[in-house]
Amino acid sequence: MLYRKAWDRLVVWKANGASSHALMLTGARQIGKTTLVREFAGRYYGHFAELNFLTDPNASTIFDGPLDAKTIIANLTAYLRTPLEPGDTLVLLDEIQECPRARTAIKFLVEDGRFDYVETGSLLGVRVRDVPSYPVGFEEQYRMFPMDFEEFCLANGVQRSTIDLLRTHFRSRTPVSVAVHETMMRLFRAYIVVGGMPEVVQRYVDTHDIAQTSQLQRDLLDLYRLDIAKYAQRSDRTKIRAIFDAIPSQLDDRNRRFVLADLSKNARQNRYASSFLWLADAGAALPCYNVSSPTAPLAANEKHSLFKLFMNDVGLLCAASMGNIQFALLQGELDVNLGSIAENVVAQELTAHGYAAHYFDAKKYGEIDFVVQSGTRVTPVEVKSGNDWTRHKALDNVLAVDEWNIDQAWVLCKGNISQDGAITYLPLYMTMFLEPEQPPDSMPFTVDLSALDTPDEQ
């Protein structure tokens, strides 16, 4: 089984009392949600029941009647004809966007408490209007992504001790050995071509045949296009498909910014806004908005009319745009059309690790590929695929603005780790260690009210 970080989330969910709330796994199609839950059930439960509302539309009839737990569970056991043991059964409601009433029923099933429930949804963001009532307070959500580079490394036999060693170097800002650095760069190039879709990764691990992985990637791209035809509003399908197919060429443009005029001379942002959101909600694309200034909070500075649009998986981007130059990339020709590819893989990693990716572009200062926020600290990120990674005029301009109080920046490049003032040069593969600061589990705060106990004014 391929290791997924979402496994750890499932373990925590069960340890914290899975019977008190269902777990909803969201994310794009074919990123491994169902496989993960099946493996988890086999490890932690004596009984497992699975309903897939996409492949078995009749399963929705379980929820056609009253939505009280007694009726639903009676229908469920009759439909599955499988013994369900209270306290030791995990029920998977797969592709739950196909049965909105099942989403509503979660509240009553969780209150019943006999079984634990995991839901998975691939297109929840584009089917929200169909749900009669949401199970607020009875469901927690966890968003999954394609496999990140660390998961890819583990799938390919890299030992955890090696990743821990690399993390130590990342934290101490000390260079890794030349042999390790070169090996990791080769593995990173493989990740660029293969990407993180689990089926594709498994085929690569089994065969190391790029031709086979490329065919799987093309099949997945076709599946995404079929989803657009099936789930999008009829009036939006053509626009969504045009945007999805244009992502590779738009990223290949010099400034990477998505330009609607390239789709149609008469295209207007307000007419296409819902189409971009559809792709983002479906998990097929990752929007990256421009900010008016690289200061916290970045979300308050977003300019929604200016954005880059990345693929959800760098391997799919390669398959969609790169013809037959994958072999050149694997051989180390990183600056062959790699500017857009390198930015895409960084956007993918930052998003999967919990950052909301933005970028900054102003005529006075130049363009910064990404700016990210952790707490109140904003960090500019430059991505360099060529050999000139120490040249970054826009980054220097931004760091020189005192009122922005930017005290660190990252340049992701082919070189080893080094430090130059506020700038840290990191190998591209160390993007796997870039994560925002996590909030503490507990933040107790008490206001001293003793001064209010004095009846007389001071």
Image (cartoon, rainbow, N blue to C red):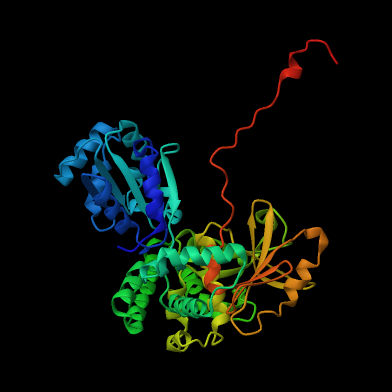
Count of picture labels: 0
300 or 236: nearer the viewer: 300
Q: Residue 220's spot in the image, x, y percent?
A: 36, 72
The answer to whether residue 333 is left or right of residue 74 is right
Q: Is residue 263 visible?
A: no
Q: Is residue 166 visible?
A: yes
Residue sticking out furthest to the front: 177
Which quadrant of the figure contains the N terminus? Answer: bottom left
Q: Residue 369's spot in the image, x, y percent?
A: 64, 71
Quadrant assignment, res 148: bottom left
195 or 112: nearer the viewer: 195
Q: Is residue 276 above or below residue 75?
A: below
372 or 96: nearer the viewer: 372
Q: Residue 432's spot in the image, x, y percent?
A: 51, 65
Q: Residue at x 50, y 86 (%)?
A: 332
Residue sticking out furthest to the left: 81
Which quadrant of the figure contains the C terminus? Answer: top right
Q: Residue at x 15, y 41 (%)?
A: 83
The answer to whether residue 287 is left or right of residue 320 is right
Q: Is residue 385 above or below residue 373?
A: below
Q: Residue at x 47, y 82 (%)?
A: 321
The answer to whether residue 39 is left or right of residue 387 is left
Q: Residue at x 52, y 88 (%)?
A: 333
Q: Is residue 279 above or below residue 245?
A: above
Quadrant assignment, res 35: bottom left
Q: Residue 269's spot in the image, x, y percent?
A: 61, 66
Residue sticking out furthest to the top: 455
